[in-house]
Amino acid sequence: MEELIVSVWMVTYNHQDYIAQAVESVMMQQTDFNVHLFIGEDFSSDDTRDICQSLKQKYPGRISLFLNERNIGPNKNAKSIYEACFNSGAKYIAMLEGDDYWTDPLKLQKQVDLLEASPQLVACHHWQKVAKKKGDSFEEIEAPKEGHGYFPFETNVRSIFENKMRVKARTVMFRNIFEPSEITLNFPKAAFGDVPLSFVLGKYGRFGFIDEEMAVYRQTTTGVSTAGLKELGLKKFKVQHFKNWIEIWDYADRFYDFKYHKEATETVLGFYKTITDNLPKTIGSFIKVLYYDLFKRRLPFHRKIVSSKWIILYYRKKLGYRLKRKLTIS
């Protein structure tokens, strides 16, 4: 049996208008190695499942299709396909969501060639375009690069995030060298997002960069983030999103000794401001103390989290007010 070199991770839900283009962009790849596509179809309410089954028949032996018998949500669906990719024995893993697509038929070949020639690299990525809705169709436009900067041949995870450049899922290829549990243990609330993945990868090597636009991010209302919002509801989704950023910030502090970039700061501070503006003054004062403990005290971030729990318990007792569980940091 031919050795599997690249496993492609794909998740889809209610993507009937987009999934065929996503799959075909994988099938069009011109490579001198074996590529296999793993699709997680999360019990869509439209024709996505039927389209996936037709595509699997069209390309026998090249697609593994996982059909969930009920909607399990974006987190579980993403993790199950990650496990399938990791367990496939492929040397490299590439990612593409069911509403995005690749545009260069040599994308995978270029990335494998770079990684094969550069053992110090754990992953490589490239630029993307954005497809925005215009009438009944989508128009591809160049994604903004201001403030992101073009990277040298290789860089580390610190440089990527300090320059506000995320490693986008649809652009990254990485070595199959760690267990999925490394992300689930450090980021239990994350849906195998590109940010947690990048931080974990950064422990194993540097990142290569290809200065080409070879993928398109389609801006729709059916992406993983939107699906998560619908699944949990707005309030629960916001709290989970906040906790996820806390995990990311803590991970960066523990493993890289630097705080995550501007977006995390704004997310966390915005959460506190929302609570402070909408709760009684007594609870607002509690939030201010918690803010001071988290951001002003010169302690390692994971120790701040622990000490903040003690502040929460103290204020519960002092004010005689039981804060709802969703306002704690767990």
Image (tube, helix red, strand yellow):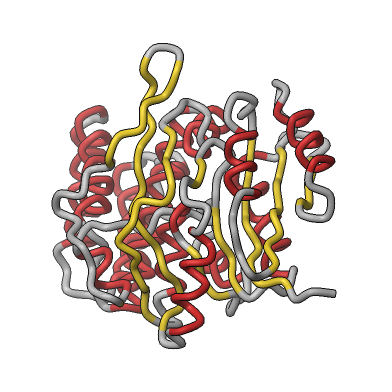
Answer with left or right where residue 326 lies relative to residue 33: left
Using the image as rendered, state which of residue 159 and residue 278 is in the foreground: 159
Residue 95 drawn at (x, y percent): 55, 55
Q: Quadrant of the N terminus?
A: bottom right
The image quadrant that residue 47 belongs to is: top right
Q: Residue at x 41, y 51 (%)?
A: 214
Does residue 150 show up? yes
Res. 189 visible in picture = no
Across and down, in percent, residue 141 comes to 30, 34
In the rendered view, tell whether residue 114 sits above or below residue 245: below
Q: Position of residue 113 (x, y in %)?
A: 49, 75
Residue nearest the viewer, comparing 49 with 51: 51
Answer left or right for 228 relative to 36: left
Name the residue at 14% across, 64% down.
296
Which residue sits at x=72%, y=39%?
A: 41
Among the 4 quarters of the image, the one containing residue 85 = bottom right
Q: Looking at the image, which is closer to me, 188 or 29?
A: 29
Q: Residue at x 34, y 68 (%)?
A: 209
Side of 330 relative to 296 (left or right): right
